[in-house]
Amino acid sequence: MAETLLKVQDLQSWYGESHILHGVGLEIGRGELVTLLGRNGAGKTTTLKSIMGIVEKRAGSVTFAGQETIGQPSNVIARLGLAYCPEERGIFSSLNVEENMLLPPQVKQGGMTLDEIYQLFPNLKERRRSQGTKLSGGEQQMLAIGRILRTGADMLLLDEPTEGLAPVIVQRIGEVIRTLKSRGFTILLVEQNFRFAATVADRHYVMEDGRVVDMIAAADVAASVDKMHDYLGV
C-alpha cells in the first residue's frame, strides 16, 4: 500500500445515547480508492461523518496525514484536506449551479478551477445559470461532487453517489471517479451497489453492526462472491 493518508483505529461514535460505531478500524493509502460496503444500518455513513467530526460524540483515533483529529472540530479537519459529499447532496435551492459551486471556501491551495470542473461535468456548464434544485438527480449529484473539488482537498469522502440514478448516469459517475483517482485524489466511497463499487475500487472494507468485519482486495473479489453475497445479500 502507498503511504498511509488516513488511519482509523478503534473509532467509536454516538448519536445521543445510541452507540453506533463499535471500534471501526481501516487504513487508506495516498491515491487509493477504497469502498465501504455493508447493508443499511451497518454504520457506513456514520463512519464518514465521524471521520469528518460531524457526530455528537466520537472516541478512538483518526489520523489524517499524520495528524490526530479526534477532539478537533470539523472545520479544522476540513482544512487538513478532507472533503465530504453527503448522500442528500445539500444543494441550495436559492442558488444557481455556479453559485452553489462557488459557495464552499477553498481550504488549501491546488483545488480544481471552475473550467476544470466543467470539463468533468459538461452538463453543469450548460446548466450553470439554472437553479440548483431544478436539476435532474444525476446533475445534482454531479454538482455535489463538483462543489468539493474546488476546496483543495486531498481526500474525498463520497456517500452513496449512485443512489437512485439511472444506469447511464451511474456509468458517468464511475468515469468521473476513476478520473479523479487518476488525478491523485484519495477516495473513500460508501456504496450499496457492489457491482458499481467493484468497477472502481482498489479494496473493499465490509461493515456489519458498526464494525469493519472484512477487507477484500479488488483482485480477490471474483473468488469472494459467495462471501460478499452473505455480507450484502447481493
Image: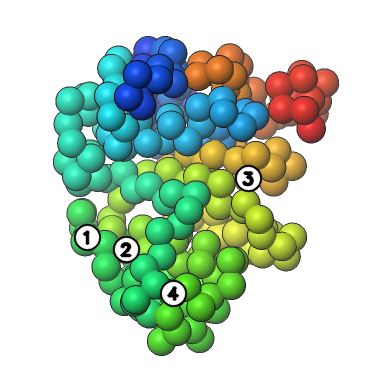
Extreme front residue here?
A: 17
Report the quarter where the C terminus lies.
top right
Residues at marks 2 and 3, CA–CA distance in whole angstroms: 22 Å
Q: State whether residue 107 is above or below residue 65.
A: below
Disc 3 is placed on an element classified as helix
Q: How many marks?
A: 4
Q: Where does the image place residue 233, in percent across and percent down from the top left?
A: 77, 28
Disc 3 residue type?
Val
Disc 2 is placed on an element classified as loop
> Which residue is disc 2 drawn over?
150
Question: Residue 132 got which mark?
Answer: 4
> Which residue is disc 3 drawn over?
200
> Which residue is disc 1 drawn over?
106
Assess disc 1: are there few (<14), some (14-19) or many (≥20) residues with their C-alpha within 10 Å of its C-alpha: some
- Residue 169 visible in the shown view: yes
Q: Where does the image place residue 51, in percent across and percent down from the top left?
A: 34, 32
Disc 1 residue type?
Gln
Q: State whether residue 156 is above or below residue 24.
A: below
Disc 4 is placed on an element classified as helix
